[in-house]
Structure formats: C-alpha cells, structure tokens
Image (cartoon, rainbow, N blue to C red):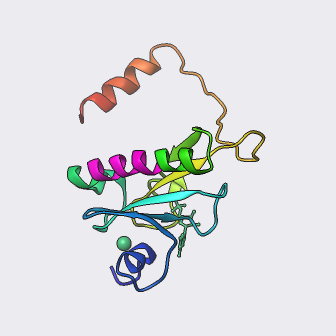
C-alpha cells in the first residue's frame, strides 16, 4: 500500500523507534503517545481492521503484544497497561492499517478510558444477542 504510513515504516522507508520485529509483526513507539512508552503492534501484511486480518497474523500480533507488554512492565512500567484497537472511522481509526495500541498506565496519569453505561429495555438484550449470533 503506497500511501500507508505503517507500510512505509515496515518497508524501512520512514524511521521508527522499533522495539520488536518477527516474520509477521513489528512493534514501535507511537509518535504521539497517550503515555510515554505507548507502543503499537502492527501486522506486516496490510489489512484495515481486525476482521480483515488473517488468523496467523492475528495470533502473531497478540503474542507480540504480550511480549511487549511484559517488556514494558519490566523496564519502567508497573504491570498496568491498556490494550486498545480502533477499528473503522467511527471507532476513531486514523491510520487504516490494523494496529494494536499498548499503553502503559501510571498512578495519577491523565488518560481516561471510560464510557457512560446505557440500559437495555425489556427483551432488547436477547434481540441483540440473536441478531449477532446468526452471523457467528
Ligand atoms: P489510530 O487512531 O489509527 O488507532 O491510531 C494511529 C496512531 O498512529 C496514532 O496514535 C498516531 O500517533 C500514530 N502514528 C501516526 N503516524 C505515525 C508515524 O509516522 N509514526 C509513528 N511511530 N506513529 C504514528
Ligand atoms: Zn499498510
């Protein structure tokens, strides 16, 4: 993908602060971190979202995420981190190459990953479950 910034990083055309690389994935620091040490784990094959990723790439990506999370915790972290993956425009995905955010958390940091809670009415929760189950 010629215009994809992460494909350019994978191809070595633009620099990155690389932490980890194997046959299927690469991990580097996010250039505009939510907290310092914020890493991205990125499959080498271009796919836009998690759903479009091949199972082997997905498996490699989540294993690499664990590896990097462990290294973050052992280096300067404290074992607390959030994993975030924005999939699609409405979810806030800005770079259209699938990636997992790994964000170290610290006491009194200013990051907030919270949502307000809605309520289902009557049997609505069952209707939602039925609708989704049909496509599993
Ligand atoms: P998204 O909103 O798509 O989930 O997040 C994309 C992330 O990629 C952002 O947090 C942004 O800071 C990061 N990013 C965008 N361009 C670059 C770049 O050229 N290098 C690095 N290291 N990170 C980038
Ligand atoms: Zn790409």
| Residue most extreme to the front | 75
Residue 134: x percent and y percent? 24, 31
Q: Tell me what residue is drawn at x 40 percent, y 27 percent.
A: 128
Q: Is residue 115 left or right of residue 19?
A: right
Q: Is residue 86 rendered magenta in the image?
A: no
Q: Tell me what residue is drawn at x 32 percent, y 32 percent.
A: 132
Q: Tell me what residue is drawn at x 37 percent, y 52 percent.
A: 64
Asked whether 20 or 94 is in front, the reply is: 20
Question: Split into 4 quadrants, where in the image is the C terminus?
Answer: top left
Q: Is residue 67 rendered magenta in the image?
A: yes
**Which quarter holds ligand 1?**
bottom right
Position of residue 38 relative to residue 110, above or below, is: below
Question: Split into 4 quadrants, where in the image is the N terminus?
Answer: bottom left
Position of residue 109 relative to residue 17, above or below, is: above
Say which quarter of the image contains residue 30: bottom right
Q: Is residue 44 left or right of residue 91?
A: left
Residue 32: x percent and y percent? 64, 66
Residue 100: x percent and y percent? 45, 54
Say which quarter of the image contains residue 27: bottom left
Position of residue 122 relative to residue 10, above or below, is: above
Residue interval drawn in magenta: 58-68
Q: Tell me what residue is drawn at x 52 percent, y 71 percent.
A: 17
Asked whether 18 or 136 is in front, the reply is: 18
- Please name the predominant secondary structure of the magenta segment in the image: helix
Q: Is residue 119 left or right of residue 25?
A: right
Residue 113: x percent and y percent? 64, 41
């Amino acid at each position: 993908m010629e215009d994809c910034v992460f494909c350019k990083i994978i191809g070595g055309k633009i620099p990155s602060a690389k932490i980890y690389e194997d046959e299927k994935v690469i991990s580097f620091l996010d250039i505009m971190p939510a907290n310092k040490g914020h890493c991205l784990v990125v499959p080498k094959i271009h796919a836009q979202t998690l759903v479009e990723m091949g199972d082997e790439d997905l498996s490699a990506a989540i294993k690499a995420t664990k590896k990097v999370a462990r290294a973050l915790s052992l280096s300067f972290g404290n074992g607390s981190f959030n994993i975030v993956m924005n999939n699609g425009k409405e979810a806030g995905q800005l770079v259209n190459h699938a990636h997992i955010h790994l964000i170290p958390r610290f006491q009194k940091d200013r990051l907030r990953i919270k949502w307000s809670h809605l309520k289902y009415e009557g049997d609505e929760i069952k209707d939602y479950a039925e609708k989704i189950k049909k496509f599993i």
